[in-house]
Amino acid sequence: MVLRRLFFLIALFCLSCSETPDELLTGTPLEKGEQLYQINCVRCHGSDGNKGASGAKQLKNSKLSKRQIIDIIKDGKGVMPSFKNTIKGDSSFIWLAEYVETLKK
Ligand code: HEC
């Protein structure tokens, strides 16, 4: 019983912390990118990339290459924070950038 409660507490803690272990993500690379986007980016960019909170760029108008998108996610830009320490795993950034590219119209 104690063990189970401990496990629950740890699970709860992991849900509330900002780190995103990529083993929690499921599906195709694009679906994983979408999950990472929902967790980390929606609060400023909105689910369609056009919310523009805190001066966030409209992602659908973005002219950036995938490489440039990855660099911005890693390093941040202006008000946008760096996600280098928040998002784990190099492939996570590629998944995210690929998902961001699907928001471009
Ligand atoms: C705190 C709010 C905030 C969060 C969270 C945030 N962004 Fe941003 N984002 C911004 C702002 C503000 C800019 C504009 C930066 C500038 O040009 O000065 C921006 C710019 C960008 C750009 C550049 C667009 C262009 O064409 O110049 C991309 C790509 C981007 N964000 C992707 C993401 C992704 C992917 C995530 C999630 C990992 C994310 N952002 C999370 C606020 C945010």
Image (tube, rainbow, N blue to C red):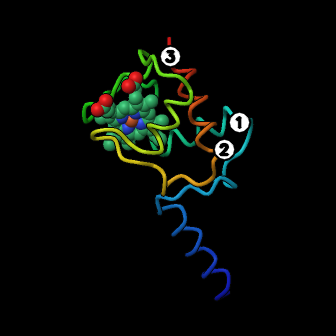
Q: Which residue is mark 2?
A: 91
Q: Residue at x 62, y 37 (%)?
A: 94
| 98 to 71, vertically: above or below | above
Specify the amino acid type for callout 2: Ser
Question: Is tag 2's residue or tag 3's residue first in the polypeptide sequence?
Answer: 2
Residue 16, numbered label: none
Q: Residues within 10 Å of mark 2 (few under 14, many from 20)?
A: some
Residue 96 appearing in the image: yes
Q: Nearer the viewer, residue 4 or 31?
A: 31
Residue 104, numbered label: 3
Q: Nearer the viewer, residue 3 or 91?
A: 91
**Which element carries disc 3, helix, strand or loop?**
loop
Pair 2/3: label in front? 2
Asked if the residues shown at circle 1 and circle 3 are in contact, with their CB atoms under 8 angstroms apart, the answer is no
Question: Is tag 2's residue or tag 1's residue first in the polypeptide sequence?
Answer: 1
Work out which residue is located at the far right of the displayed protein and give it.
Answer: 28
Q: CA distance from mark 2 to mark 1?
A: 9 Å
Q: Residue at x 43, y 25 (%)?
A: 49
Work out which residue is located at the far bottom of the displayed protein and give it.
Answer: 2
In the rendered image, the quadrant that contains the N terminus is bottom right
Q: Residue at x 53, y 36 (%)?
A: 70
Question: Is tag 1's residue or tag 3's residue first in the polypeptide sequence?
Answer: 1
Specify the amino acid type for callout 1: Pro
Quarter location, residue 10: bottom right
Question: Position of 31 compared to 63: left or right?
Answer: right
Asked if the residues shown at circle 2 and circle 1 are in contact, with their CB atoms under 8 angstroms apart, the answer is yes
Residue 85 drawn at (x, y percent): 48, 57
Q: CA distance from mark 2 to mark 3?
A: 21 Å
Residue 93 drawn at (x, y percent): 58, 41
Q: Ligand 1 is in which quadrant of the figure? A: top left
